[in-house]
Amino acid sequence: MKSAAIFTLLFGLAGYAAIMFAVSCTHKPDLQDVPEICFESEVLPVFLNSCAISGCHDGSGEPDLVLKSYPDIMKGIKAGNPDGSKIYKSITLTSGEDKMPPDQPLSLDNRTIIRLWIEQGAKETTCP
C-alpha cells in the first residue's frame, strides 16, 4: 500500500514537472489534480538532510537562516509564491554565491516538492 502511494506521488510530481516545462511563463498549470504535499514527511526531510546539516543551516553555521523547523523555514518562504521565496530562489540557482546547497544541488524531485508545497500554500501539514 505504501509503495502504491509513493508511486502515485512520484507519478504526479513527474507529470507536474512535465507541465512546468511545457507551458509558457505566463500560464500556470492547474494544481487541483496534484496531491497535497505533506510538510512533515516530504518537505521537512529535504531541509533536514540537505540544508540543516552541521555547520550550515542548523543554527551553528548560518544563525540568521536556520532550516530545522516550520517556523524557521517560513522566514524564507512566501506561501503561494515560490518565485518570491528567498529559499526557493536559492535552491533553483545554477551558479553564484547564493546557490544552495553550494556543492550539490537538490534533485529535480526535491525542488519540485518544495515548489508544489509553496504553491499549495506552504502549510504545516502532518500526514499519515
Image: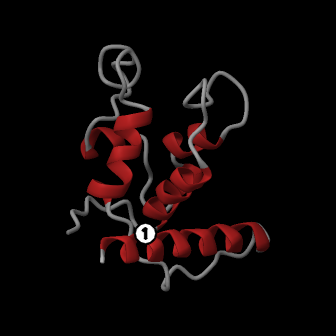
In this view, the residue in front, 101 or 81, is 101
**x then y, percent, for residue 84:** 56, 50
Determine whether 76 is above or below 17 in the image: above
> Is residue 63 visible from the viewing direction of this image?
yes
**x then y, percent, for residue 128:** 20, 69
How many marks the image carries: the answer is 1
Quadrant of residue 120 in the image? bottom left
Residue that badge 1 annotates: 120
The residue depicted at 30 percent of the width and 78 percent of the height is: 1
Looking at the rendered structure, the secondary structure element under dot 1 is loop
**x then y, percent, for residue 89:** 59, 43
Quadrant of residue 53 in the image? top left
> Is residue 75 visible from the viewing direction of this image?
no
**x then y, percent, for residue 4:** 39, 77
83 relative to 74 in the view: left or right = right
Quadrant of residue 118 in the image? bottom left
- Three-letter amino acid code of the residue under disc 1: Gln
The residue depicted at 26 percent of the width and 55 percent of the height is: 40
34 relative to 48 in the view: left or right = right
Determine whether 56 is above or below 21 in the image: above
54 relative to 16 in the view: left or right = left
52 relative to 78 in the view: left or right = left
In this picture the colour scheme is: secondary structure
The residue depicted at 31 percent of the width and 24 percent of the height is: 58
Mark 1 surroundings within 10 Å by alpha-carbon count, few (fewer than 14), some (14 through 19), many (20 or more) = some
The residue depicted at 41 percent of the width and 69 percent of the height is: 6
Determine whether 71 is above or below 9 in the image: above
